[in-house]
Image (cartoon, grey):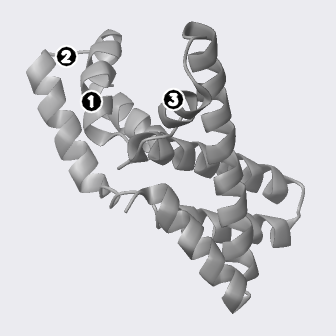
Amino acid sequence: MSLKIKIREDLESALKEKRQNRLSALRMLLAAVSNREIDKRTRAWKEKPELSTEDLKKESQLTDEEIFETISSEIKKRKEAIDLYEKGNRLELAEKEKKEIEVLQSYLPKQMSEEEIKRTIEEVIKKVGAKEMKDIGKVMKELMPQVKDRADNSLVSKAVKELLG
């Protein structure tokens, strides 16, 4: 079963069970997925105007990997909103965003622990022969495909800087 179908089914069950936080988060996620599909369809239509409507629809379907990217993006937006709400002393709104993050994270692959992240970074540093901060680009280029969707990018970046610094 594709991830999008699972999200839709979970949205329906949240609707039946009247779980408002979950319902809200899943609706926003499906809207973000739909927007990405529309963007993808528009690009495909511009590149290949000879495609039929059916072919365009098939070509614009997001893969699970692309949906993971969308989920990560939505989580990042909510983290930024939490910071702003906390600065504005709107703790109830920050709490709502935190609950939505929990819902969204349940659809991502199992997240790496900090130990796993550091171990992976150390392996990559050895592999590329990085010695100082100027080598951070080489490390990140090699590292990001390995931790993609399984670790928070800001944590990864911070750990790389610590280990190289």
- Tell me what residue is drawn at x 65 percent, y 55 percent: 30
Residue on which disc 2 sits: 130
Amino acid type of the residue that numbered disc 2 sits on in the rendered structure: Ala
- Tell me what residue is drawn at x 35 percent, y 57 percent: 109
Q: Observer-nearest residue: 107 or 110?
A: 107
At which x and y percent is residue 165?
Answer: 33, 25
Q: Observer-nearest residue: 56 or 80?
A: 56
Label drawn at residue 55 = 3
Mark 3 vs mark 1, foreground winner is: 3
Residue on which disc 1 sits: 143
Above or below residue 77? Residue 43 is: above
Element type at mark 2: loop
Above or below residue 141? Residue 65 is: below
Amino acid type of the residue that numbered disc 3 sits on in the rendered structure: Asp
Categorize mark 1 by other alpha carbons within 10 Å: few (<14), some (14-19), many (20+).
many
At which x and y percent is residue 93?
Answer: 83, 66
Amino acid type of the residue that numbered disc 1 sits on in the rendered structure: Leu
